[in-house]
Image (cartoon, grey):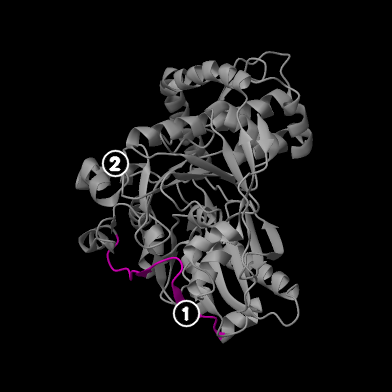
Amino acid sequence: MTATPETTPQTAPEASGGGLLLGIDIGTSSSKGVLVRPDGTLVAQARREHTTSSPFPGWFEHDAERVWWGEFCSLAQELLARRPAREPLAAVGVSGIGPCLLPTDDRGTPVRPAILYGVDTRAVAEIAEQNERYGAEDVIRRCGAPLTSQAVGPKLAWLRRHEPAAYAATDRWYMASSYLVHRLTGRYVLDHHSASQCTPLYDLAARAWISERREEIAPGLAWPELVWPSDPVGAVTPEAEARTGIPRGTPVVAGTVDAWAEAVGVGVAAPGDLMLMYGTTMFLVATLERPLTSPHLWGTAGAFEGTYCLAAGMATSGAVTGWLRDLTGTSYEQLTAEAAQLPPGAEGLVMLPYFAGERTPLFDPDARGLVHGLTLRHGRGHLYRAALEATAYGVRHNLAAMGEAGAAADRLVAVGGGAHALWTRIVSDVTGRAQHLPRHTIGAAYGDAFLAAVGAGLARPGDIAHWNPVVEVVTPDPAASAVYDELYGLYLDLYPATREAAHVLAARHRIDSGAIREA
């Protein structure tokens, strides 16, 4: 592996007037915010950590009032306190984890915690029922993606069946970004990209809700107006000003799911561009010139009108490294240093990273984590390196699925808090692919600020190349890649070889946890 500066010079345009852009993103385990000038200059950034609730196996939830809105307010207040004098605020952009399901009453007050995206696997029975009702192939054809734990439709059906009192109190439902927009402006909207992940409720070609399915799956609910992520949808209300410090009347754009905001923020806009988002989960977004579908991936609307995407997502990546950090009581820095001293393959270990099931390309909520090859001489550094390598094998597996679906991935852009030297080096060595690192890899909040700039008329979609140029390229080491080619074959073999046992253990886990729940 070598890391080299990007050779093509890119010059930022002259700074223009118009005011600052505030971008805030709500992630799985942290929230981030930035203040950015209209030329892309980063003025200030801030971060908050939070936890994800998992009251039962397969359940993952957030307290929307405390985590989503509370951390938004805290970040906004901190960033605005650091705003340079005489620089007004021009617009606000938001993003968040998704697709999620937050049921609320008609005033937008949550009636229960938000049910998170594909890591939450509670709606297995409802997925099967909706596949039977609408036809698995027709769902993919019309909606662009198969029905999986990622989809909102089965989550709505689960709520109606298992928590009838909560459903009876529900009038609206939100995702993280749309809930923040509501709290800021009073509007009830959802962007087209987020809607395209509400399988089987959104028609990808028609760019519209499927009305008959809405009433069948979730009768009696009000549905959000569909807009595009950079569309200005309202202005900050006096009530929101009092909580956030954002001046009343400041324009707010619709925002979107965090991975797509992050893709916007690093210039993954041309066909052939693909983003690797290193975070609690690993996410891949490929930009397309036409819609593509695959039974193993998610076809979606893009962040801008007229664009499409093919996406993939692993259920865990940083979540496993965090688990190892907590389990060993060791810092990330120490674990990384120990792992970096080891050769490719972690001296004979191969890990399956399915600690929360797996999303693409397996779509198996009952897949389970596995460390194969353990001996008494292996230590925490070996496990940590094996976890990084497991994520890299998962990336390679998903890139192969994208290629089979017809999506070219000519340029890979690495972003996210986990995009550090060792991890990106391992991913390049495992995949045999170079990765481009932009100047800013701070996350979706930067993309939120750019979407706000576009909505406020201070930038055009193509201006992101000047906002966030590539500054480094990570290239694979052929010798390491040869080792990983052999180990990747073992990685692919391990899942089918252990799937039956994993499913038995997953069922056992549900039985045992059910007994604990009832006790």
**Position of the N terminus by quadrant:** top right
Which disc number belongs to residue 234?
Answer: 1
Query: Eyeballing the image, is 83 above or below 54?
Result: below
Dividing the picture into quarters, in which one does residue 448 lie? bottom right
Q: Looking at the image, tell me whether mark 1 or mark 2 is earlier in sequence order.
A: 2
Cα distance between the residues tagged 1 and 2: 39 Å
Q: In the image, 184: left or right of 407? A: right
Dividing the picture into quarters, in which one does residue 391 lie? top right
Amino acid type shown at disc 2? Ala
Q: Residue at x 37, y 70 (%)?
A: 171
**In terms of depth relative to the viewer, which is nearer, 442 or 226?**
442
Q: Residue at x 77, y 31 (%)?
A: 337
Residue underneath mark 2: 128
Helix, strand or loop at label 2? It is helix
Asked whether residue 228 is drawn in magenta, I would say yes
Amino acid type shown at disc 1? Gly
**In terms of depth relative to the viewer, which is nearer, 69 or 21?**
21
Q: Does residue 425 appear in this view?
A: yes
Q: Which residues are magenta?
A: 218-237
Q: Position of residue 412 (x, y in %)?
A: 52, 41
**In terms of depth relative to the viewer, which is nearer, 66 or 344?**
344
Q: In the image, 211: left or right of 370? A: left
Q: Does residue 64 appear in this view?
A: no
Badge 2 local density, few (<14 within 10 Å), some, or many (20+)? Answer: some
Magenta-drawn stretch, dominant element (helix, strand or loop): loop
Asked whether residue 111 is drawn in magenta, I would say no
**In terms of depth relative to the viewer, which is nearer, 124 or 406?**
406
Q: Position of residue 357 (x, y in %)?
A: 47, 35
Q: In the image, 345: left or right of 173? A: right
Helix, strand or loop at label 1? It is strand
Q: Residue at x 70, y 70 (%)?
A: 79
Badge 1 local density, few (<14 within 10 Å), some, or many (20+)? Answer: some
